[in-house]
């Protein structure tokens, strides 16, 4: 995968320090809080020992971390009023396969042919300076306004 690898939630298991929450038949089950050795706190729902929803919060820098159903990171960064806000990294969950050069004048043709976006967000949208990494290893850097690149 180009532009850096995503983090898998299971890679964090060695860093689990404490679990607070519900149990059922000896398994973590229901709502629970998982603290990692680096002070990140994951809040989620457990089903028979498996964390099914994974949202973390890093107490030291205020970032939120969201993992998807496939245990790959979806987002890490600033969060305000339940939306991406401030600096962050958004990973594409459904990556396409762009095999040719990308025409920067036609973002509608991009579809899911991107790996991740690193940059600023405002009210849940790409907004400010940021870089979009495409599946063909190209990078598109610029100023974004409401999910669209300007200039």
Image (tube, rainbow, N blue to C red):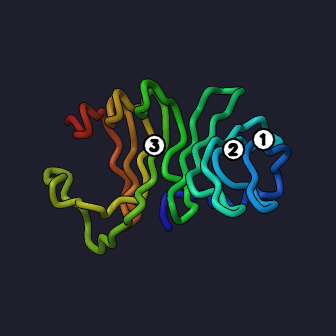
Q: Is residue 12 left or right of residue 131?
A: right
Residue identifier under label 3: 118
Disc 2 crowd rating (10 Å Cα; few below 14, some 14-19, many 20+) is some
Q: Secondary structure at mark 3?
A: strand
**CA separation in Å, label 2 and label 3:** 30 Å
Residue 77: give x, y in percent of width and height: 53, 36
User: Where is residue 150, by image quadrant?
Assistant: top left
| Quadrant of the image containing the C terminus | top left
**Mark positioned earlier in the residue sequence (2 or 1):** 1
Please name the residue shown 15% across and 55% down the image.
Answer: 108
Residue labelled with disc 2: 32
Callout 2–callout 1 Cβ contact below 8 Å: yes
Mark found first going from the N terminus, 2 or 3? 2
Residue beneath the point at 34% across and 28% down: 123
- Disc sitting over residue 20 in the figure: 1
Check disc 3: other Cα within 10 Å, few if <14, some if 14-19, many if 20+: many
Label 1 environment density (alpha carbons within 10 Å; few <14, some 14–19, many ≥20): few
Q: Nearer the viewer, residue 72 or 119?
A: 72
Q: Is residue 83 left or right of residue 10?
A: left
């Amino acid at each position: 995968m180009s532009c850096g690898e995503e983090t898998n939630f299971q890679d964090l298991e060695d860093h689990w320090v404490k679990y607070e929450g519900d149990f059922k038949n000896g398994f973590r089950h229901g709502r629970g809080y998982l603290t990692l050795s680096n002070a990140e706190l994951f809040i989620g729902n457990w089903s028979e020992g498996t964390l099914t929803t994974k949202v973390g919060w890093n107490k030291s820098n205020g970032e939120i971390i969201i993992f998807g159903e496939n245990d790959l990171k979806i987002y890490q960064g600033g969060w305000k009023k339940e939306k991406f806000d401030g600096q962050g990294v958004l990973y594409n969950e459904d990556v396409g396969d762009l095999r040719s050069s990308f025409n920067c004048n036609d973002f509608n043709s991009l579809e899911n042919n991107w790996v991740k976006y690193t940059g600023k967000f405002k009210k849940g949208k790409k907004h400010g300076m940021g870089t979009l990494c495409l599946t063909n290893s190209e990078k598109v850097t610029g100023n974004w306004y409401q999910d669209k690149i300007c200039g």
